[in-house]
Image (cartoon, rainbow, N blue to C red):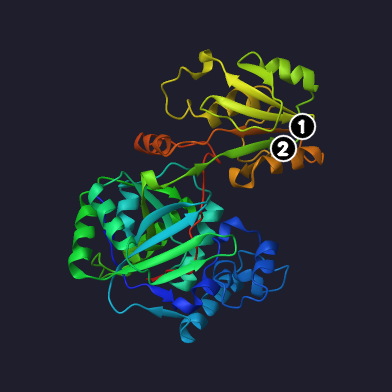
Amino acid sequence: MAIFKPFKAFRPKPELASEVAAKPYDVLNSEEARQEVIGHPLSFLHIGKPEVDLPVNTDLYSKEVYLKAKENLNKLIKEQVLVEDETPSYYLYAQTMDGRTQYGFVGVASVDDYWNDVIKKHEKTRKDKEEDRANHVRYTNSHSGPIFLTFHDNKDLQAIIDNISATKPNTDITSLDGIRHQVWVINQDNLIQNIQQIFAATKNLYVADGHHRSAAAAIVGKERHIANPNHKGDEEYNFFLAVAFPASHLKIFDYNRLVKDLNNLTPEQFINNTKNNFNVSKLNTQSKPSQKGQFTMFLNHQWYLLEAKPTITDIVDPVEKLDVSILQKYILSEILGVNDPRTDKRIDFVGGIRGLNELEKRVNSGEMTVAFALFPTSIDELISIADAGAIMPPKSTWFEPKLRDGLFVHFM
């Protein structure tokens, strides 16, 4: 059963929260981050991507980068931009985008639960990215980018969400991208105990987004456990910052694909080859797939609808039946020769939040030759794959809105 505890967060003063809150470190490259912090000295990007305060040619994985993160974080605390709450609390965090609101509980999850698979994962992680985030945790002695968790809906937790969200939030800001972020502090003893007991009866939590950050937190937690001869299990390094959302609150966007060339095929040859496993028809206009098993394709200024034939969709395996797996196996690999999407330089991925115009633009520019739009993976598919102990293909899910860094910091 899951351990999900309250903690004493360092949070920005409400009047400064809009200046502190920042996009996660992994949705911006260094140049984008440098542009984003211009005129925003309190932005948490100074901690999440501290290379913005160092020379452009700085090695992103150097000791100087992590030391700068530590320095910048300590400065925000010293100047009382970030202030520690007096008592351990849970927090309700709401994000509103395009008229839809998702509510999650902020707390700290258990490192032991991560290693014991109470917290279930569905992605492979890369060692270099793990080590980068682990160094960030080691040097700053903190977790500042919350892990995005989900769990099966619970009516008692939903009732708590409904009651709390009807009151005035402690923090209420709208970020530059138009997303509203609200925070309520939950510090009543009886309510804290109730929430903790409900989570304690929850069989599993699932990593929706943040596999590298959760792996890094677990790695550092284990290191500190081993290094501490007086380890008791209640030290803060045994827990990491997370936001846990009921599954029904979440929306997964499509994660689309672009390929640089047609693997020495003409467009006509390529389309004919796709007809072995797909029904192919021209579309009159730009269009997204309307259901599972459909794909739309942009090639030579023309949109096409590809519908997978029953011979390739009648599959039991939860991974193989994913649309991303079907596209990968029967088109990207079999026809276009993109056998490893993790390493092949001919393929690129575009989150659905950017829209189909982004696919058209990159194909029409000549940078790419063909684009594929997918129907979004469902949260039920994600959970079923995690329950099976299986791994989803890379770039299977794109969650929006993204959790903001800097609204909560957990020190170890």
Q: Is residue 349 above or below residue 106?
A: above
Name the image quarter holding residue 238.
bottom left
Return the residue nearer the eye: 386 or 238. Answer: 386
Calculate the distance from the C-alpha at mark 2 to the C-alpha at mark 1: 7 Å
Task: Give the residue displayed 19% in from the left and 63% down from the top.
Answer: 193
How many numbered marks have been drawn onto this rendered protein structure?
2
Disc 2 residue type (three-letter): Arg
Image side of residue 182 versus residue 228, left or right: right
The answer to whether 393 is drawn above or below residue 411 in the figure is above
Q: Which amino acid lies under the numbered mark 1 shown in the image of this protein?
A: Asp
Residue 339 at x, y = what percent?
63, 30
In x, y percent, where is residue 209?
Answer: 46, 50
Task: Decide if residue 287 is on the left or right side of residue 392.
Answer: right
Instruction: Report crowding for label 2: few under 14, some 14 to 19, many 20 or more residues within 10 A (C-alpha).
Output: some
Pointers 2 and 1 in contact (C-beta within 8 Å)? yes
Residue 278, given in percent of the width and then of the height, sits at 61, 17
SS of the residue under disc 2: loop
Q: Residues within 10 Å of mark 1 (few under 14, many from 20)?
A: some
Q: Is residue 409 visible to us here?
A: no
Q: Work out whether residue 285 or residue 130 is closer to the camera in this orientation and state it.
A: 285
- Is 146 or 184 nearer to us in this picture? 184
On-image quarter of the C terminus: bottom left
Determine which residue is flagged by label 1.
261
Image coordinates for residue 11, horizontal then vertical, percent: 42, 74
In the rendered image, which residue does mark 2 sit on? 346
Label whose residue precedes the other's in the sequence (2 or 1) = 1
- Let me know if residue 172 appears in the view: yes
Tell me the element at label 1: loop
Above or below, comparing residue 116 to residue 356 in the picture: below
